[in-house]
Image (spheres, rainbow, N blue to C red):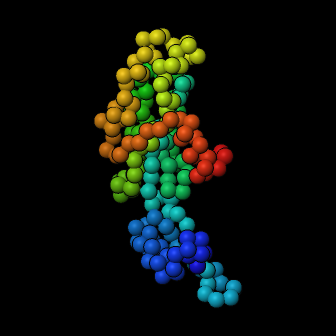
Amino acid sequence: AEIARLTELSPQTVSVIVRQLEKDQLVTRGSSVKGKVGQPLQPFSLNPEGAFSIGLKVGRRSTDVLLMGLDGKVIRETHHTYDFPVPDNVLRLARDGVQCVTAGLDAALRPRIAGIGIAAPFDLWKWRDELGAPAKVMEAWRSFDLKSEIEKISAWPVSHCNDATAACAAELFFGKG
């Protein structure tokens, strides 16, 4: 009833959609809440194992890879620091990190991985002076297509956005962390 009210869909439409989400194991049914007027309330919640995503953050001083459940909670993560990002090293850290965070995932759940999202500063080569990095290393980022390189080592779809944009989206969805 609350979903119907919030979405302005009919209760029948909401019921059909929720039943399909439940069948697809994206939501789980909680215990009915009784004691109020009318039908008992039927709570639903996101199934943390309903879908997974892999996040890759390439920063100016570190790289992180994480596996996140549908509820937005981090299941496993890796973190590696460096003085400055080197394209080939970042690619290796990403490959190793993806293997690490997905290694413990049950084989039956692997098909539920929706994709890899990359958050990285655009124009990394412009950070040479701030990072104190060799010009040649940072200039390599100018022609390095991170998304394409990750797609070559990934079995999943890959999306890429600016790190600041990704942080804003995360805060919008999950609040300040």
Question: Could you tell me which quadrant the N terminus lies in?
Answer: bottom right
Residue 148 pos. (x, y %): 33, 34
- Residue 7 in view in this figure: yes
- The residue located at (36%, 22%) in the rendering is 143
Q: Nearer the viewer, residue 141 or 82?
A: 141
Q: Nearer the viewer, residue 170 or 108?
A: 170
Farthest residue, direction bottom? 38
> Is 158 located above or below residue 16 in the figure?
above
Residue 38 pos. (x, y %): 64, 89
- Residue 3 in view in this figure: no
- The residue located at (46%, 64%) in the rendering is 26
Residue 48 pos. (x, y %): 51, 58
- The residue located at (38%, 42%) in the rendering is 158
Residue 57 pos. (x, y %): 50, 35
Farthest residue, direction front? 8
> Is 35 located above or below residue 150 in the figure?
below
- The residue located at (44%, 56%) in the rendering is 51
Question: Could you tell me which quadrant the C terminus lies in?
Answer: top right
